[in-house]
Image (spheres, grey):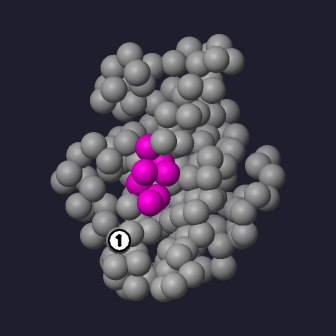
Amino acid sequence: MMPSTYPAPRKNVLLLSCMDLRLLDDIVRFMHRDNLANRYDQFILAGSSLGANLHGAWNEVFFQHIETAVELHGIQDVYILEHRHCGAYEKFLGDEGTFDDSTEDQKKEQELHKIHAVELAKRIHSWSDAHQYTLNVRTLLMDLRGEVSILEYLPASPNV
């Protein structure tokens, strides 16, 4: 189980996750462990943050969805959930997105996911600041057994 390395969300959450069928039940279990049963909207894109970062139309729809989730469900937190051995990373990035199980590749894979997740998190903050919303963003990485580690926690800007 993941150690509590960030404040628990007190309001509803928007979860961005990948479309990988292998992890659907693990995602639900993780969200329940984070005390979010029936308190999150799930938005799915192939490659999670990578999909939003690479595809303009997906990015546009994602931000429209965030706005709707804030207005209808009062979300104040966004989870960007990446996962290891992501087929979308392989499809979109080729060899750069392909990793084996060696310790060296595991570190490279984690760093690549963090780069894309934090890039999206920063864009979420810029967008939320411009719209005067308060959104904390947590970037996370799930392995193929459903274990989750935090990549980075980016609290909302204090000036909103």
Magenta stretch prevailing secondary structure: helix
Q: Where residue 87 appears, x then y in whole percent?
A: 41, 27
Quarter where residue 130 is shown = bottom left
Res 74 visible: no
Residue 128, given in percent of the width and then of the height, sits at: 40, 75
Against 138, residue 73 (above or below) is below
* Residues in magenta, as a range: 116-122
Q: Looking at this rendering, what residue extends furthest in the left direction?
A: 57
Q: Which residue is at 56% across, 53% downward? A: 139
Q: Is residue 31 magenta?
A: no
Note whether 23 is above or below 128 in the view shown.
Answer: above
Towards the viewer: 91 or 25? 91
For label 1, the SS is: helix
* Circle count: 1
Q: Kindly identify which residue carries mark 1.
A: 127
Q: Residue at x 76, y 49 (%)?
A: 2
Viewed as shown, does residue 155 lie left or right of 68? right
Q: Position of residue 77 (x, y in %)?
A: 54, 71
Q: Nearer the viewer, residue 60 or 114?
A: 114
Q: Is residue 144 visible?
A: yes
